[in-house]
């Protein structure tokens, strides 16, 4: 997006717009940009002019009007950003500059004045004579041009803060024009979806990685659970009330004799939570319970917290059962993670063995045919340069380097990256032509500098915009989103 502010010099016409949702109070606040307030009348009058200016010679759709409303608002913000930069002394504009400007870039409205025309055409000599003979007129034209000239000078000043380095541009051009095309065989273990770890292998994987799940300073709860998900049960409301009464009775008795004994007296089964530590927010089989975690680490074993209403709807009566210096997260809690990781490890191992056999049994002449036979993916890559991303593989610098170092018509060595393997047949090799560089270098450097400066301006604008306090109430006065018809 370019943030050059467009100066709108159009006559305000009455227009009933489909965007206006009602007839609001003219003094109602539509928005505020820094210290500039826009009530409904001020904003709407300006917006009508903006619509008229941009709608000349065409019929605006509702979507066009929504887009222009957002564009108009962004330009008001842009004007404020630029004005603040000018006010802060980012640039200075002298009368001599403005006088030169109104002679060089004559406003279009001035050219339409008949006193400055000869035979129906603008006569620059008459205009310049009027500037000499009428100082007040010259001052008016200078003031008229001041904002646009100031904005243009500011933009130019900001852009000129950066310059392209010709050597850097040349290096970038050389890299861009040093490329190859290739057919890449991708040995992807993720495709081996039929290869899965057995239960014993999953358990063994957990044991092999058990140290990952070692934790210090654990706590556990003894608890009685009163189910809360009773919506499908008969007499659900009655059972919920019974559970509430029973849990309260258990809680009160547990406070007297402890939860274990109270549960035995009332014939209520108990269960024990797994261990958790002070950094946990979720207690397995209980759910998210930061208050219970905090209680466990601020009270002695045997303490009974308030009745807990779990996220699942269950009612829990608990007693802090035990503390332990260290513990391991239980296998059952980590089981699904272990299945995923064990499957991945087994698929990697299987693919690695396949690749080794492939390289021993196949030759460059049969690589592609064998890959297709075994349903191994073959990807067509166009214009591979030193550091670009190869879709859909992503960034693999070692693969790019191998492709660029391999002659056209040959295969790269086998490349391994994060347990993915690649073989690439280079189908085309293009080297930079320095005669083209010498022929076009001025334009190439100029284009690179233009982009560098535009990016710098945009970055500067975004940084300044972030500093502006903005209140945007337009949605209360205008429809700013198109309704999707399903």
Image: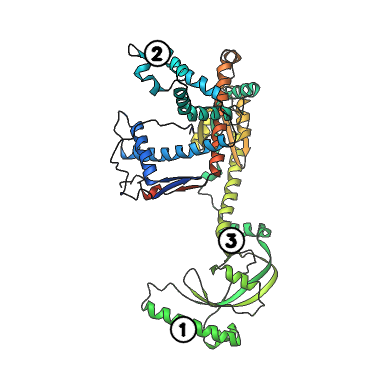
State which tag comes first along the sequence, 3 or 2: 2
- Please tell me whether mark 2 or mark 1 is closer to you in this view: 2
Query: Relative to 134, does residue 224 appear above or below in the rendering?
Result: below
Q: Nearer the viewer, residue 419 or 361?
A: 419
Q: Nearer the viewer, residue 282 or 80?
A: 80
Residue bearing the label numbered 3: 334
Q: Tag 3's secondary structure?
A: helix
Query: Relative to 169, does residue 247 appear above or below in the rendering?
Result: below
Color encoding of the figure: rainbow
State which tag comes first along the sequence, 3 or 1: 1
Residue bearing the label numbered 2: 123
Q: Nearer the viewer, residue 476 or 324?
A: 476
Q: Is residue 209 left or right of residue 188?
A: right
Residue bearing the label numbered 1: 245
Other residues around mark 2 within 10 Å, as few (<14) / some (14–19) / many (≥20): some
Distance between the alpha carbons at the discs numbered 3 and 2: 86 Å
Q: Nearer the viewer, residue 14 or 295?
A: 14
State which tag comes first along the sequence, 2 or 1: 2
Residue 223 on image: x %, y %: 56, 77
Instruction: Please say whether residue 366 is visible from this viewpoint.
Output: no
């Amino acid at each position: 997006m370019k943030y050059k502010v467009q100066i709108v010099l159009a006559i305000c016409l009455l227009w009933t717009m489909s965007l206006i949702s009602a007839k609001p109070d003219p003094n109602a606040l539509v928005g505020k940009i820094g210290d500039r307030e826009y009530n409904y009348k001020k904003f709407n009058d300006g917006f009508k002019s903006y619509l008229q200016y941009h709608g000349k010679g065409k019929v605006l759709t509702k979507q066009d009007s929504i887009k222009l409303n957002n564009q108009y608002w962004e330009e008001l913000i842009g004007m404020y950003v630029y004005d603040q930069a000018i006010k802060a002394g980012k640039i200075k504009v002298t009368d001599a500059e403005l006088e030169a400007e109104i002679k060089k870039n004559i406003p279009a409205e001035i050219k339409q004045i008949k006193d400055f025309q000869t035979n129906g055409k603008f006569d620059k000599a008459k205009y310049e004579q009027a500037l000499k003979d009428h100082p007040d007129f010259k001052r008016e034209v200078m003031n008229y041009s001041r904002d646009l000239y100031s904005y243009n000078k500011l933009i130019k000043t900001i852009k000129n803060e950066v310059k392209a380095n010709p050597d850097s541009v040349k290096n970038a051009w050389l890299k861009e024009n040093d490329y190859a095309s290739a057919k890449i065989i991708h040995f992807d273990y993720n495709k081996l979806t039929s290869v899965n770890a057995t239960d014993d292998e999953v358990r063994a994987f957990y044991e092999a990685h058990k140290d990952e799940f070692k934790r210090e300073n654990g706590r556990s709860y003894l608890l009685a659970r009163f189910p809360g998900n009773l919506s499908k049960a008969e007499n659900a409301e009655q059972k919920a009330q019974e559970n509430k009464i029973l849990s309260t009775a258990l809680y009160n008795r547990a406070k007297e004799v402890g939860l274990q004994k109270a549960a035995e007296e009332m014939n209520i089964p108990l269960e024990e939570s797994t261990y958790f530590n002070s950094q946990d927010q979720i207690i397995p089989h209980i759910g998210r319970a930061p208050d219970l975690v905090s209680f466990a680490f601020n009270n002695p074993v045997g303490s009974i917290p308030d009745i807990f209403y779990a996220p699942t709807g269950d009612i829990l009566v608990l007693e802090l059962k035990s503390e332990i210096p260290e513990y391991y997260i239980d296998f059952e809690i980590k089981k699904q993670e272990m299945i995923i990781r064990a499957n991945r490890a087994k698929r990697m191992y299987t693919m690695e063995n396949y690749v080794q056999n492939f390289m021993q049994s196949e030759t460059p002449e049969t690589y592609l045919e064998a890959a297709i036979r075994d349903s191994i993916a073959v990807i067509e890559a166009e214009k591979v340069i030193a550091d670009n991303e190869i879709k859909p593989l992503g960034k693999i610098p070692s693969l790019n380097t191998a492709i660029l170092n391999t002659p056209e018509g040959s295969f790269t060595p086998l490349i391994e990256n994060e347990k993915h393997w690649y073989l690439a047949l280079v189908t085309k090799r293009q080297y930079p032509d320095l005669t083209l560089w010498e022929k076009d270098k001025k334009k190439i450097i100029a284009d690179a500098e233009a982009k560098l400066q535009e990016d710098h301006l945009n970055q500067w604008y975004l940084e300044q915009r972030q500093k502006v306090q903005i209140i945007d109430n337009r949605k209360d006065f205008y429809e700013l989103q198109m309704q999707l018809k399903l």
